[in-house]
Image (cartoon, helix red, strand yellow):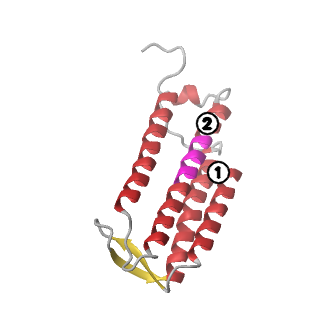
Amino acid sequence: MVRLALLAACGAAFVWITSLGLPDVVASHFGGGGGANGFMSRGTYVGVMLLVVAGAPTLLGAVSHFGIGSVNSRINLPSRAYWLAPERRAETVSYLQRHLVNVGTALIVFLCYVHWLVVRANRLQPPRLSSSAITVGLAAFLMFALVSGVRLGWHFRRPPGSES
């Protein structure tokens, strides 16, 4: 949880510092070809990005800490009785919390990358987002999410020693 909060603060600082050179009106939405088709004031853009970059991952961290960590939490897992038995509950909760922190970390990195692309796009006249750069970033994030989800499912697929 602390790691995620520190990374969210670093992400917010990155957004704040890199936004200083943005124009008063920021191209904030881009069409399929990369051309700008949505605009907002710099203050609104920065506020939204700060909220998203720091807020979403912090919410994930809070859910993992308070929601999953609570003794009354309703965690849905295959073989739930096995994984949440008193002798394994702390280890299971710790694994799930680490997983959510890793997802939150990847989310911060991806959102900061998207912000950086928007900053770069606004340096051009007319503003233009690199379609290939956003595609590569999105593909990397989705690949991480897929691998992470598969690893989570694989970890909890069935209790050790159970038959196939």
Query: Residue 69 sits in which quadrant?
Result: top right
Residue farthest along the bottom direction in this orientation: 24
> For numbered disc 2, what is the local secondary structure?
helix
Q: Is 69 located above or below residue 56 in the figure?
A: above
Q: Is residue 52 left or right of residue 31?
A: right
Q: What residue do we see at 61% from left, 58% from top?
A: 58
Please provide the residue range marked out in magenta: 97-107
The span from disc 1 to disc 2 (Cα, nearest Å) is 14 Å
What's the mark number on residue 95? 2
Q: What residue do we see at 65% from left, 49% from top?
A: 65
Q: What residue do we see at 47% from left, 28% from top?
A: 154
Q: What residue do we see at 44% from left, 34% from top?
A: 150
Q: In this orientation, which residue lies closer to the viewer: 121 or 147? A: 121
User: Main SS type for the magenta part?
Assistant: helix
Quadrant where the image shows the C terminus: top left
* Mark 1 surroundings: few (<14), some (14-19) or many (≥20) residues within 10 A: few
Say which residue label 1 marks.
Answer: 66
Q: Position of residue 30 (x, y in %)?
A: 35, 71
- Label 2 is placed on what type of residue? Tyr
Q: In this orientation, which residue lies closer to the viewer: 27 or 86? A: 27
Q: Position of residue 17 (x, y in %)?
A: 62, 72
Q: Is 59 located above or below residue 19 in the figure?
A: above
